[in-house]
Amino acid sequence: MTRVAAIDCGTNSIRLLVADADPHTGELVELDRRMTIVRLGQGVDRTGRLAPEALERTFAACRDYATVIKELGAQRLRFVATSASRDAENRDEFVRGVLDILGVEPEVISGDQEAEFSFTGATKELTGRDDLARPFLVVDIGGGSTELVVGEEHARAARSVDIGCVRMTERHLVHEGAVSDPPTPAQVEAIRADIEAALDLAERTVPLREAHTLVGLAGSVTTVSAIAQNLPEYDSAAIHHSRVSYDKVREITEWLLASTHAERAAIPSMHPGRVDVIASGALVLLAIMERIGAREVVVSEHDILDGIAWSVAGDSGA
């Protein structure tokens, strides 16, 4: 066993996993897993820069994570930064801050690397199951981008497209500094048009319709599962490997798109940081299911973070 730490810094959230990993047995024993909504990508789509307040929120989370990593005695740490910090003009400021706090430089990885890590994290424990047909399509709906990966034991084809829940919300639902509540039909159609164009782009290189099992990752998908199960609070164990039918995803998405901020915030399993972006994220999931004719989505709590941890332990495929 090797005690490793992995940090995934995305557009909307930053997450930490500390685990003991054994590449020979495929066992990953989780010691600490946590997530903080920092909205690092706040305004990036519009300004091209990371906002000072977004950087400070992110650095504050990094300081908290540094304490946890030290207390648990992780031997190795890898910090991966995704969409928002790829796009920002002032990403050097972000890199310096992380290096000062954690002692490692964040790796601003490509969309293809991001997809590979997501696939490894999501499918490593699914590959031996007889009830799930392959190929898998792993869909990781993030804040700034969505990764789509098709593969069997390993990723075969991958594409990252810019249709994350934060990006879609900021691009289409924000008017005069406030999120439309609820969005107009025209705004929803504008999001849908962006999603369909992105899926057209992805299909040039990724055979989405060859997939037999859809595996959905990240906060938008796990929140849809929590709502589908009517959970009294967010319950990772109940969500992990749950299955949500297409009809249920459609029902939830339609409700979210017609709801007010207060109605969404009242959902007991809803993280406060997702209230304004969950409708866009759910719409991305629904559109993908419609595109490939998926009857259900298998929801995984193991994702890019677990893939990063495996890469630190020396068994990642990337």
Image (cartoon, grey):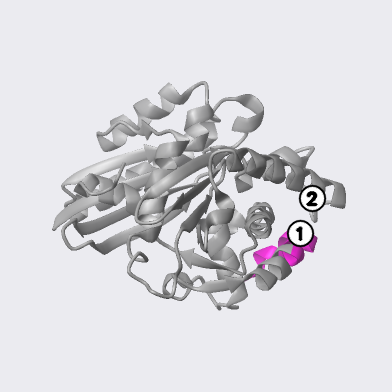
Residue 217, position as x, y percentages in the image: 49, 57
What are the residue bounds of the magenta stretch?
254-269
Mark 2: which amino acid?
Answer: Val
Mark 2 secondary-structure assignment: helix
Quarter of the image with the C terminus is top left
Dot 2 or dot 1, earlier in sequence: 2
State left or right for residue 109 relative to residue 104: right
Q: Determine which of the numbered discs, if any, sits on residue 257 in the image.
A: 1
Up-down relation of residue 163 to residue 85 (above or below): below
Residue underneath mark 2: 188
Image position of 176 with respect to 231: above or below: above
Question: For this rendering, which residue is in front, 175 or 3?
Answer: 3
Q: Amino acid at mark 1?
A: Leu
Q: Residues within 10 Å of mark 1 (few under 14, many from 20)?
A: many
Q: Which mark is residue 174?
A: none
Q: Nearer the viewer, residue 13 or 255?
A: 255
- Percent x, y for residue 198? 65, 40
> Few, some or many C-alpha atoms within 10 Å of disc 2 (few <14, some 14-19, many ≥20)?
some
> Compared with residue 126, is residue 104 higher up or lower down, i.e. above or below?
above
Q: How far from the left and from the top, in percent, is residue 108?
A: 40, 32
**Residue 237 appears at what percent x and percent y?**
41, 74
Q: State whether residue 67 appears in this view.
A: no
User: Do the CB atoms of the residues marked 2 and 1 lie less than 8 Å apart?
Assistant: yes
Q: Residue at x 79, y 37 (%)?
A: 176
Q: Nearer the viewer, residue 74 or 138?
A: 138
The question of residue 273 being in magenta is answered with no
Residue 198 is left or right of residue 93, and the answer is right
- The secondary structure type at the circle numbered 1 is helix
Residue drawn at point x = 58 percent, y = 39 percent: 161
